[in-house]
Amino acid sequence: MKVKRVICAAGRSGYMHRDLMAIKAGARQDGMIFHGPTVTPGFKKIVEPATIISVMLVLEDGQMAFGDCADVILAGVAGRDPVFNAADYMEVMEGPVAAALTGRDVSKFKANADELDKMQVGGKRLHTALRYGITQALLHAAALSGKETMAEVIAREYGSTISKTPIAILASGHKDDPTQLDRIILKRFELLPHASFTVVKDHVGFKGEILHAWVKMVATRIKTIGDADYRPRIHADLYGTLGELFSMDVEKIADYIGTLREAAAPYDLLVESPMIAKTQAEQIAKFGELRGLLKKKGIQVGIIADEWCNTLEDIGLFADAQAADFVQIKTPDLGGINNTIEAVLYCRKKGMGACLGGTANETDHSARICTHIGLACQPDFMLSKPGLGADEALMIQTNEMARTLAILKTRS
């Protein structure tokens, strides 16, 4: 099956872009926006609505395959590509990228994805957002060509085994919305609520008291309104705030995490990005040291790596060093979804936990495609996306998995 024509359309993502460095530098919050100068190159404002490009492949039999080019909320930091704006890349997509796709046989996914993921224009590799969307479209096209689900294409080409049950989902939401917390408890998300703690003063407290109280509140609410047999894991994304609070003193960070573990009881606790080092090498070393200290102190908390762990190669370094309990495979940061597939499989091979992550800044279509990757590669859990509403993402991902599993069951 060949591509007859390529069509591109600019659209909206599921969330926003945020200049993390400007926020950490003390920008004043005013509702959703922040007042102050931008810091990260590419940002015009500290908070900006984000855009995507849908790339559509018209196949020779008239079927339409598509993927959505999107990047992460906190673009341009810790080794990530600059902030993505659709208008800046339409010419590239409708020119050299369209030329590379038109006439291509898309019945196989992996070889095409590997080639397009490495494509260069003007001596530079394509932005990760473009590579993300293009390879989504190629996977969709391969599935349409073979009259298969996308999960079946992945399993066949990568030699993986498709899960017979849904993959657990980590709710992604707002830490200050009590009704949302209630909903994700009632809907029995397996992990919750992936709340973001980005500023020490406002979100953690100079003595750690704000974060500690929040963890305690979540545990109490689960016990109060959750089903008797409901045992979710509590998750907090700290964006390096513990490193800032304790001046990267790993011993103090470990001891403080121990107090969070007590506050979360009787539920398990996962902590993402407790610190962000200045270099990748330091990040790996500090995470490894923290993991070792927690084990030595008998503190059972799962540590998740995110920043400085963006590409397939980065994930390989963290996995080889056993620097964390889990790695958040932030799908747009890896560029082509072929890299995401290989990252999950490599983590499993190395015995390292994998979160098939991503960002609220994605789309419904990219979220559906990622559920197929999840079913085919079996990560430990997936991040809910797009958006931070949780309800909508759970609906999209749960239903896509349910449909796929039902189809596969009839074939067996």
Image (tube, grey):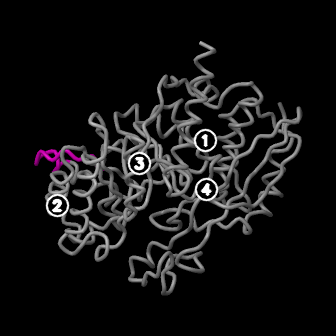
Q: Residue at x 43, y 77 (%)?
A: 23
Residue 368's disc number: 1
Which mark is first along the chain, 3 or 4? 4
SS at badge 1: helix
Where does the magenta region start and end? 292-303
Q: Is residue 323 visible?
A: no
Residue 184's tag is 3
Spatial CA distance of label 2 from label 3 is 27 Å
Query: In what quadrant of the picture does the N terminus appear?
Result: top right
Q: Are marks 2 and 4 in contact (CB under 8 Å)?
A: no
Tag 2: residue type? Answer: Tyr
Q: Nearer the viewer, mark 1 or mark 4?
A: 1
Horizontal arrangement in the rendering, residue 182 relative to residue 231 (left or right): right
Seen as rendered, the residue at the extreme front is 225
Residue sitting nearer the eye, 86 or 296:
86
Q: Position of residue 54 (x, y in %)?
A: 73, 53
Q: Are marks 2 and 3 in contact (CB under 8 Å)?
A: no
Residue 128's tag is 4
Residue 297 is one of the magenta-drawn residues: yes
- Give the residue type at disc 1: Arg
- Which dot, 1 or 2, sits closer to the camera? 1
Q: Looking at the image, tell me whether mark 1 or mark 4 is earlier in sequence order.
A: 4
Most foreground residue, 385 or 39: 385
> Is there any visible trace of residue 149 in the rendered image?
yes
Q: Say whether disc 1 or disc 3 marks the residue closer to the N-terminus.
A: 3
- Which quarter of the rendering shows the C terminus? top right
Q: Nearer the viewer, mark 1 or mark 3?
A: 3
